[in-house]
Amino acid sequence: MHTIIKGTKTVAEFKKVRTKMEQLATQAFESHKKASGEWKEGGIEKVWFDSDSNICVEYQSGNWWHYNGQGEWW
């Protein structure tokens, strides 16, 4: 999983944000995959936060989604 992290000022802050991103991405992936029935997107390829602080996850297929704190995606 590649994480794209901007704006951290210390190594400790970077590590904290990276851990949070990986946890959120994994939760989003599991929820989305479970709701989809037959998952064809593959595993997580890349993760970042959008300008509204939603987690964005790109999969091995090249498709990606935004995920909010309520478990919704678009």
Image: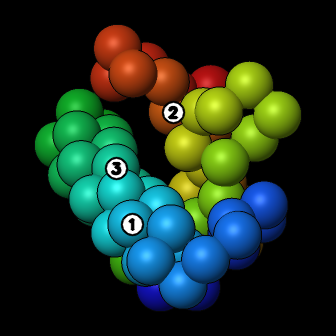
**Mark 2 sits on what residue?**
67
Q: Residue furthest top?
A: 70
Q: Is residue 5 left or right of residue 31?
A: right
Q: Secondary structure at mark 3?
A: helix
Q: Nearer the viewer, mark 2 or mark 3?
A: 3
The mark nearer the N terminus, 1 or 3, is 1
* x then y, percent, for residue 5: 69, 69
Labelled disc at residue 16? 1
- Residue 46 in view, yes or no: no
Secondary structure under tag 2 reads strand
As measured in the structure, the alpha-carbon distance from the residue carrying label 1 to the one carrying label 3 is: 12 Å
The reply to whether dot 1 and dot 3 touch (C-beta < 8 Å) is: no
Q: Please give the residue where the numbered disc 3 appears in the rendered image.
A: 24
Tag 3: Cα neighbours inside 10 Å, few (<14), some, or many (≥20)?
many
Give the class, few, some or many, for how many residues have Cα within 10 Å of label 2's Cα (few <14, many ≥20): many
Left or right: 7 with respect to 10? right
Image point (68%, 66%), residue name: 8
In terms of depth relative to the viewer, which is nearer, 69 or 35? 69
Q: Position of residue 43 (x, y in %)?
A: 39, 77
Residue at 50% x, 68% y: name it: 13
Q: Residue at x 36, y 57 (%)?
A: 20
Badge 1 marks a residue whose secondary structure is helix
Q: Earlier in the sequence, mark 2 or mark 1?
A: 1
Query: Residue 16, how many percent across, how many down?
Result: 39, 66
Q: Give the residue drawn at x 65%, y 33%.
A: 53
Marks 2 & 3, CB-CB < 8 Å contact = yes
Q: Can residue 48 be seen here?
A: yes
Amino acid carrying label 3: it is Leu
